[in-house]
Image: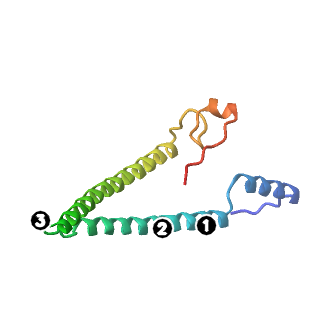
Amino acid sequence: MMRVPVPVRLRKAVRTWFDSRYISIADHRQDIRDALWEVQTLRREMATLQGEVERLRNARPPAAGDKAGDKAGDAHRLAQETAKALDGVLQNEVLVWQAIDDLRTRLSGGEAPVGDQATGRPADERARGRSEEQPCA
């Protein structure tokens, strides 16, 4: 490799240009840490929910025949229905994340939607100056 003397003004201009176009390594590392923390949080929540589903599935059905047994039977039936519904929600969440990953793969592979690549909004919405919508929390 050969070193070539470069004027200070040119070197400064090139560094400024690179700094304005690219994210810094420290910012990139922080983004990765934040994403990892978010994934770990979601993993813990999923594990908790799956444990709750299993607990509800394995609940013992009460003896039928008396009034308390009927209430307990209804509670058990509701627990089973809740477990099935929650399991369906978790499966749908996995499908949503798979679709998001697939879309990201397609977008990074060169296929770009019509409009804004960063937000996914059509070009005519950007031209009208609409602000980004935030999901309800």
Q: Which residue is mark 1?
A: 29
- Which label sits in the foreground, 2 or 3? 3
Q: Secondary structure at mark 2?
A: helix
Marks 2/3: CA–CA distance: 44 Å
- Which numbered disc, 3 or 1, marks the residue that appears first in the sequence? 1
Circle 1 crowding by C-alpha within 10 Å: few under 14, some 14–19, many from 20:
few
Q: Secondary structure at mark 1?
A: helix
Marks 3/1: CA–CA distance: 62 Å
Q: Is mark 1 in CB contact (under 8 Å) with mark 2? A: no
The residue type indicated by label 1 comes to Arg
Q: Is mark 3 in CB contact (under 8 Å) with mark 1? A: no
- Which of the pair 113/68 is nearer the observer? 68
In this view, 126 is above or below 23:
above
- Which of the pair 15/88 is nearer the observer? 88
The residue type indicated by label 3 comes to Gly
Q: Which residue is mark 2?
A: 41
Q: Is residue 28 left or right of residue 63?
A: right
Tell me residue 33's x, y (percent).
56, 68
- Which of the pair 137/99 is nearer the observer? 137
Residue farthest along the front direction in this orientation? 67
Q: Which mark is residue 65?
A: 3
Pick the quarter of the image with the N terminus.
bottom right
Q: Is residue 82 left or right of residue 14?
A: left
Q: Is mark 2 in CB contact (under 8 Å) with mark 3? A: no
Residue farthest along the top direction in this orientation? 124
The residue type indicated by label 2 comes to Thr
For residue 114, which quarter of the picture?
A: top right
Circle 3 crowding by C-alpha within 10 Å: few under 14, some 14–19, many from 20:
few
